[in-house]
Image (spheres, rainbow, N blue to C red):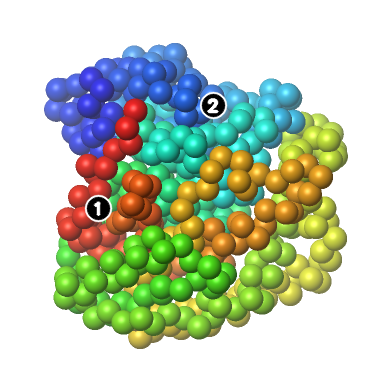
Amino acid sequence: MDELTWLDATAQAELVRSGQVSARELAEASIARIEALDGAINAVIHRRFEKALAEIDRGLPDGPFGGVPLLIKDLHAETAGDPQHDGSAALAAAGYRPQADSWLTARYRQAGFSILGRTNTPELGLVPVTEPAAYGPTRNPFDKSRSPGGSSGGSAAAVAAGMVAVAHGSDGGGSIRIPSSMCGLVGLKPSRGRITAGPWRDESGLSVHHVLTRSVRDTAAVLDATAGPGPGDLAVAPPPACSFAEAARTPPGRLRIGFLSTSPAGELHPECKEAVLAAARLLESLGHLVEEDHPDVLDDRENARRFMARWVVNARLGVEELGDLVGRSLGADDVEPLTWAMASAGASISGLEYARALAASARFARRLGSWWVEHDVLVTPTLGQLPPLIGALTPPADDPLSTQGKTALLVPFTTHFNVSGQPAISLPLHSSENGLPVGVQLVAAYGREDLLLQLAGQLEQEVDWARRRPTP
């Protein structure tokens, strides 16, 4: 039964549909693996095993993923009646439980997924590692002394360890792609407005939702099951020409591909550089027109400053929203020092400064997007460094901003496309000499997830990443 959990979600669903395995047997296999492994990894912080088995016994909807186990990141993406703490000790102490599903989790249920629990995340999802004070660090299954990334680190670690085939994540600055790179997974950040964030959040900002998987076909098929706007959504991505699953099966033809092998932050780890150079060589061997070329605005330091203005205002808003859920205003003692430092910085930004940051983001997005007029895909390293050791990016309480320089070196490639709203996918195309996964990021024009999935499917046929599994 343990091998069941290593199948991708599409294969698991077919076994259930054909009657070879029951939904309960599949759930019990995942539950057994979580119970066996998670003590050392700390990925699944809220377990709803009995509720999930009872839902299976009552009958799941007849969707494309009927009976497939799923984990939800414990940041927004509400599941009715379950603990939701957003990485916050204050919300945990208050025992907060939402009373209704978000529209996205309702779509997961309608697709037939069996939700087994919720996964660890940093407080408010603000940092690229998963080490919240409330729940402790999640560890990378490939090297438990290292981080699985963040902020969807619990979800990534669970999928990489074979606990489930697919887990939900969200991405406001790289939070699907970062942990996908560190854990050897497929991680697609969809276009802005591709998946609704309703009914409580705005999908027109930096953050989007999707899943972390081990196969391109799972990433595509789950997108088919969950894409589309909700009533009143402020951003709506254009509909694709065909299903995303069909796109993942279709060769892309000859593409014009540019690649970037240097870091806007300066230092780039040699393994990350080699990952993108090897990807460029592979793409050229597949017949694509490949050249070292990239949008000049990726080096725009002013955009980085404007992004941080939006980020810290979002941090302040997050603390205010936590207070609303707890029922009182929160102070420095209620959140982690870095969260409070970011929220305090956000409180100091005026409405005019924030409006100017939004306007600058719009100008940046248009300048960035113009590169895709003459190109199809940009290829970059997903990260600038290998997965950091646990604690390396968690700052001391008396100097909460002291690790921001290291963070900038780690994530110099992902935030641009949260600003522009373009789709970007991290693929597990490379491994370091000591066996750590190293992802490569592919970026397409706005609304062109289909093209990314075509190219990702082609690369998956050439690189057998499914065979790479962490040792227990």
Residue 431 visible to the viewer: yes
Residue 191 visible to the viewer: no
- Report crowding for label 2: few under 14, some 14 to 19, many 20 or more residues within 10 A (C-alpha): many
Above or below residue 48? Residue 170 is below
Q: For the residues marked 1 and 2, what is the alpha-carbon distance in whole angstroms?
A: 31 Å
Above or below residue 210? Residue 257 is below
Please identify the quadrant where the N terminus is shown: top left
Going 64% across and 32% down the picture, which residue do you hit?
A: 85
User: Relative to residue 413, is residue 373 drawn left or right?
Assistant: left
Above or below residue 90? Residue 387 is below
Tell me the number on the disc at residue 436: none
The quadrant where residue 59 appears: top left
- Report crowding for label 1: few under 14, some 14 to 19, many 20 or more residues within 10 A (C-alpha): many
Residue 460, image x, y percentages: 22, 55
Tell me the number on the disc at residue 45: 2
Residue closest to the eye, 388 or 184: 388
Residue 323, image x, y percentages: 78, 38
Tell me the number on the disc at residue 245: 1
User: Relative to residue 299, is residue 116 drawn left or right?
Assistant: left
Residue closest to the eye, 1 or 110: 1
**SS label for mark 2:** strand
Going 61% across and 30% down the picture, which residue do you hit?
A: 136
Nearer the observer: mark 1 or 2; the answer is 2
Amino acid residing under circle 1: Ala
Residue 455, image x, y percentages: 25, 64
Whether pointer 1 and pointer 2 mark residues with C-beta atoms closer than 8 Å, the reply is no
Please identify the quadrant where the C terminus is shown: top left
Residue 176, image x, y percentages: 47, 50
Residue closest to the eye, 269 or 464: 269
Going 30% across and 44% down the picture, which residue do you hit?
A: 214
Amino acid residing under circle 2: Ile
Going 25% across and 53% down the picture, which residue do you hit?
A: 245
